[in-house]
Amino acid sequence: MSNNEAVRPHCAEPPADRTRPALGRRHLAAAALVLAALNLRPAVTSVGPVLEEMRAALGMSATVAGLLTSLPALCFALVGFAAPRLARRHGADGVIAIGALVMTVGLATRAFAPDAPAFVALSAVALAGIALTNVLLPVVVKQRFPDRVGAMTGLYSMALNVGASTAAAVTVPLARGFGGDWRAGLGAWAVLAAVAVPAWFLLARRRAAVAPGVDVPVPATGGSAPDAGVRVGRNATAWALAVFFGLQAGAAYVIIGWLPQMFRDAGLSAETAGLLFAVTSLLGVPLSFALSAVAGRLRNQSGLAAVLAVCGLAGYAGLWAAPATGAWLWAVLLGLSNCAFPLVLTMIGMRGRDGATVTRLSAFAQSTGYLLSMPVPILVGTLYQHSGGWRAPLTLMAALMLLQLVAGLVAGRDRRIG
C-alpha cells in the first residue's frame, strides 16, 4: 500500500470537523445580513412622517425637501461606484463594517443639525455608509450562499422592509415620547445602526478561505474572484437592469419622501399618514421573501416585473382621483409596486455568473440606476411647489412607471453576464 493510500483514512475526518465552523460562519453571515438590512432605510423613511415639523424648524423649502429626498440616490450612486474597488482591497465584509460605523455616526449627529444645510450634509454621511452596504450585500449573498441566492436575498429584503416600516410608523410616537421633539425621533435610529457594527467586524475577521464544498471561499483580498474583465457597461441586460433599478428607486424615494405629505394634504392626520406609509413597507415584509424565492426559481422574471408595474399605475391613478377616500387601497397597491426592489436585487444576483461579475453588475446597476433616479424626487417637489397640488407630480410618476414596465420586461429575460 502506498503512502498516499495509507493516509486517506486519517484525512476523512477533517472536512467533517470543519463543517461546524463553516456553518457558524454561514449563521453569522445570515445574522449580519439581517442586521445590515434593517438599517438600510430608517435614515430615509424616518424623515417623511416628521417632514413638516422639520421643514418649519430648519427653514427648509419644498425644493430643498425634494433635494433631500434625492440625496439617497446621489450618495448611493457616487459611493456605490467605489464599492467594488474597496471590496477588492479590504473585503466586502470589512467595507460593510466600516459603512455601518459611518452610518451610525451620521444618524447620531444629524439629529443635532442647526439648519437645513447641516442636516443635508450629515444625512449624506449616513447615506454614504448605507451606499456601501447597498452594493455589497448582493455580493455577500452570491459568495456565501450561491445555492440560495433567491431565498437569502428575500431574507434581507424582508428585513429591509421591517426596518423601513418600523421607522415610518414609530418615529412620530418616539418624538412624542420625548416631548414632541422630532430630533429625538430621528436620532433614535442611530442605536439600531450601532447594533449592526460588531457583527460585520467579526465577520470581516473570519473571512479567511475555507475548504471547498463546506462553505464558499472568501479570499482575504476582497471576496470576489479575480477581475475577469467583463464590461457590464456594454451589455444590454446590464443596462436594462440599471434602468429598471433607477426607475423603481425613483418611485420608491418619491413614496418615502412625499407619500405621507400627500395623505396629509388630503386631510389625514400626521399619525394616520405615517401608518399609511408604514403599510407600503409592511407589505414588503412577507412579499419580499416570497417574491425573491419565487423569482430565484424562475428562468424569466419579466412577468413579475410587469405585475408590479401595473400595481404602481393603479396606485398613482387612485391618488390622483381620490387620495383620501381610497387611501388604504392606494397604500397597498404602492406597497406591492415597491416590491420591485427585492425583485431587481434577485435578478442582479442571478444574471452574473460568478461573484466577481455580480460585484461589478451590482455596482453598475445600482450606481447608474441611482444616478438616473436622482431627478425624480426633485421634479416631484418642484411640480408640487409650482402647481400647488399632486396631480401633475402623479401624472409624471405614472409615465415613469410605464417606462419601468418596459425595462422590467427586458431585464427579466433569461440572460447571463460573464
Image: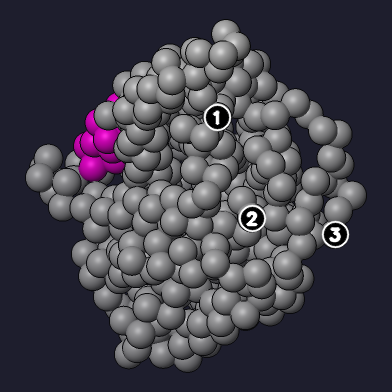
345, above or below 183, in the image: below
What is the magenta range? 183-194
Whole-angstrom CA distance, mark 1 to mark 2, is 21 Å
Residue furthest top as drawn: 3
Magenta segment, prevailing SS (helix, strand or loop)? helix
Badge 1 vs badge 2, beta-carbon distance below 8 Å: no
Kindly identify which numbered label has been placed on residue 212: 1
Q: Residue at x 61, y 51 (%)?
A: 349
Quadrant in the picture for residue 79: top right
125, above or below 331, in the image: above
Residue, disc 3: 236
Residue, disc 2: 350
Q: Residue at x 62, y 80 (%)?
A: 303
Whole-angstrom CA distance, mark 1 to mark 3, is 34 Å
Q: Quadrant of the N terminus?
A: top right
Mark 3 or 2, nearer chain start? 3
Q: Nearer the viewer, mark 1 or mark 3?
A: 1
